[in-house]
Image (tube, helix red, strand yellow):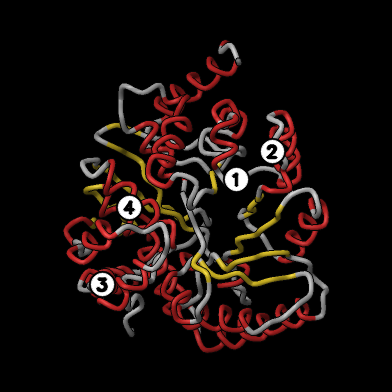
Amino acid sequence: MEQIIKSLLENDLYKFSMGQAIYHQYSDYKTTWTFRCRNEGVRFTPEMIDEIKHQIRLYCDLRFQEDELEYLHNIKWIKGSYVDFLRLWKPRYEDFHISEGENGELLLETMGTWLNTSMYEVPTLAIVNEVYFRMSYDHDKLFEEFKKRADEKALKVSKGEYRLGSYSEFGLRRRLSGEAQDYIVRKLKDTKAENSFFLGTSNVYLARKYDLTPVGTMAHEWIMCVGQGDHKHNPAYSNYYALNAWIKEYGVLNGTALTDTITTDCFLRDFRLTFATLFSGVRHDSGDPIEWGEKMLKHYESLDIDAKNKTLLFSDSLNFDKATKIYDHFKGRCKVAFGIGTFLSNDTLEKALNIVMKVTRCNGQDVAKISDVDGKSMCKNQDYVEYLSRSIEWRMNNEVVK
């Protein structure tokens, strides 16, 4: 199989935005990441696992090129000190632990510094997904179906059947293949519409290739590790510590806050006037998007902040129909944006894989995400999940809100 990840720029932008803040503030943190496939009945053959290992070795041989580093340095919030670090940085194959479990499970973990392991997540998932689909199906047949569906989507957007406002492609981690993601990004860039503007992609490599905006700020790992990695912290205040560290790094730049790491209701306890003013918007990633959006608009109103100047970014399992309904509901009341993943990068005759790699330990202790819906959490220690849940519950029921 040809090399899948061919450049270290082939990563989501938020890995670089978090990476810079990790480098400047948390370079000594250690993390463990664990792979999970949420689909029932998916099996990885020994041949697939061997190919995954081979592809990860090829990825670990990559280095940033000077023209790539220059591109990163021209992003206004990326600092020269971080670019100099990336000039020396390389993935370490020794950080990967890959084996076959019972019944064809893929057992995959990465362990090492947060600086390293954070960067592995997205390329690893892209490798696993592409290996699985190329070795399980006829890729050429799937790709032809993919192109047909992509062309139909682009045509409907151009005709105004969908209203998407500003939207971006977020599908690197679960793409059918590099070829497929390249095709949809190029297709949407060339698609013009009155009520839909294709802003860019989370894939920094493709953003550079097609002169698009690379899109992304923070992920759940930021709140989990910053908020729970220091064991002296009360984990119910994870959002406060994480948002404060983000402002320290970026000020008013690069500011879209993720709300659902330990529930949005708990997030809003910390997202008071200063944070709500400094961050340009918030991102939705679980729960009912309309209810969430209404809750956020009500919160801005309670702080006497004009929500028309703020962005609600939706990124949870979206397709164009869902996005259009959300856009129509909030249009004119705030800025609306979408990050759309698997629907754009892996829409074929076959069901896409729901694969994730999540940070499960930080500095020797369990960490967890408790989102706004069941099924998105991942932690090896149920006792820790219960402890975190009790901490949040106690705060929500007993804290005096000023």
Q: Amino acid at mark 1?
A: Val
Q: Which residue in the protein does label 1 denote? A: 282
Q: Secondary structure at mark 3?
A: loop
Residue depicted at x 51% and y 62%? 215
Q: Is residue 262 left or right of residue 11?
A: right
Q: CA distance from mark 4 to mark 3?
A: 15 Å
On the image, numbered disc 4 is attached to which residue? 20
Q: Amino acid at mark 4?
A: Gln
Identify the residue shown where x is 34% and y is 75%.
5
**How many angstroms separate mark 4 from mark 1 (CA)?**
20 Å
Q: Would you call the spot at circle 1 few (<14 residues within 10 Å), some (14-19), or many (20 or more)?
A: some
Tell me if residue 133 comes above or below residue 398 in the rendering.
below
- Asked if the residue at tag 4 contacts the one at tag 2, i.e. Cβ–Cβ closer than 8 Å, the answer is no
Label whose residue precedes the other's in the sequence (2 or 3): 3
**In the visual, does 50 lie left or right of 195?**
left
Q: Which mark is residue 64?
A: 3
Q: Secondary structure at mark 2?
A: helix
Q: Amino acid at mark 3?
A: Phe
Asked whether the residues under the numbered discs 1 and 2 touch, taking CB atoms below 8 Å apart as contact, a structural biologist would say: yes
Give the residue at mark 2. Answer: 296
Q: Quadrant of the N terminus?
A: bottom left
- The percent position of residue 101, horizontal first and vertical second, equals 32, 55
Q: Earlier in the sequence, mark 4 or mark 3?
A: 4
N-term mark: 4 or 1: 4
For the C terminus, the image quarter is top right
Q: Residue at x 71, y 78 (%)?
A: 153
Marks 3 and 1, how far apart in space?
A: 31 Å
Q: Earlier in the sequence, mark 3 or mark 1?
A: 3
Going 46% across and 49% down the picture, which residue do you hit? Answer: 218
